[in-house]
């Protein structure tokens, strides 16, 4: 009997949803919500386009403004990568002697 309860609840929820969708007032509200969502999407995409265009212009202008002269310090740094020296390995630890137990020998 328990498997029949979720089926009946789903059936009733489906019937209620269909009645709401067929209602003119509900259709108008759904259309308004769809229009607002579409406007928000278009606005967001336009903002993204403007932002990416500004960034593209900034990145294209940066190499033209920077001189291509390389300093000796930059050349030395590029030639030799900065790495830490390898750490020294430790000798393996000696095993500790077994502690005497309090028993008689």
Image (spheres, rainbow, N blue to C red):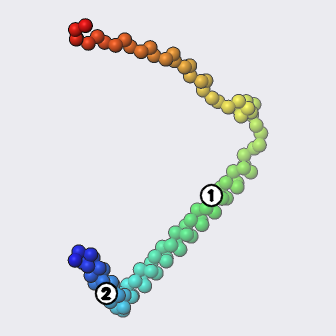
Q: Element under label 2?
A: helix
Q: Residue at x 69, y 51 (%)?
A: 62
Residue 73 makes an appearance in the image: no
Instruction: Give the crowd class for mark 1: few <14, some 14-19, many >=20 residues within 10 Å.
Output: few
Q: Is residue 13 above or below residue 86?
A: below
> Where does label 2 land, which residue?
15
Q: Is residue 26 above or below residue 75?
A: below
Instruction: Give the crowd class for mark 2: few <14, some 14-19, many >=20 residues within 10 Å.
Output: few
Q: Nearer the viewer, residue 70 or 103?
A: 103
Q: Residue at x 56, y 22 (%)?
A: 87
Where residue 99 appears, as percent x and y from the top left, is 31, 12
- Residue 55 horizontal side relative to residue 93, left or right: right
Q: Is residue 50 above or below residue 88?
A: below
Question: In the rendered image, which quarter is residue 50 located in?
Answer: bottom right
- Quote the CA–CA distance across marks 1 and 2: 52 Å
Where residue 34 appears, as percent x and y from the top left, is 44, 80
> Where does label 1 land, which residue?
55
Q: Nearer the viewer, residue 86 or 63?
A: 86
Q: Quick one: label 1 or label 2, which is nearer the N terminus?
A: 2
Q: Nearer the viewer, residue 36 or 103?
A: 103
Where residue 16 appears, as percent x and y from the top left, is 30, 86
- Residue 85 horizontal side relative to residue 25, left or right: right
| Contact check, label 1 and label 2, Cβ < 8 Å | no
């Amino acid at each position: 009997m328990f498997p029949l309860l979720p089926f009946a609840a789903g059936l009733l929820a489906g019937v209620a949803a269909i009645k709401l969708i067929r209602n003119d007032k509900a259709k108008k509200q759904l259309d308004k919500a769809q229009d607002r969502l579409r406007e928000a999407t278009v606005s967001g995409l336009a903002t993204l386009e403007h932002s990416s265009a500004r960034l593209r212009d900034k990145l294209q202008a940066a190499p033209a403004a920077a001189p291509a002269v390389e300093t000796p310090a930059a050349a030395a740094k590029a030639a030799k990568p900065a790495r830490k020296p390898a750490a020294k390995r430790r000798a393996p630890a000696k095993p500790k002697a077994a502690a005497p137990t309090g028993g008689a020998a």
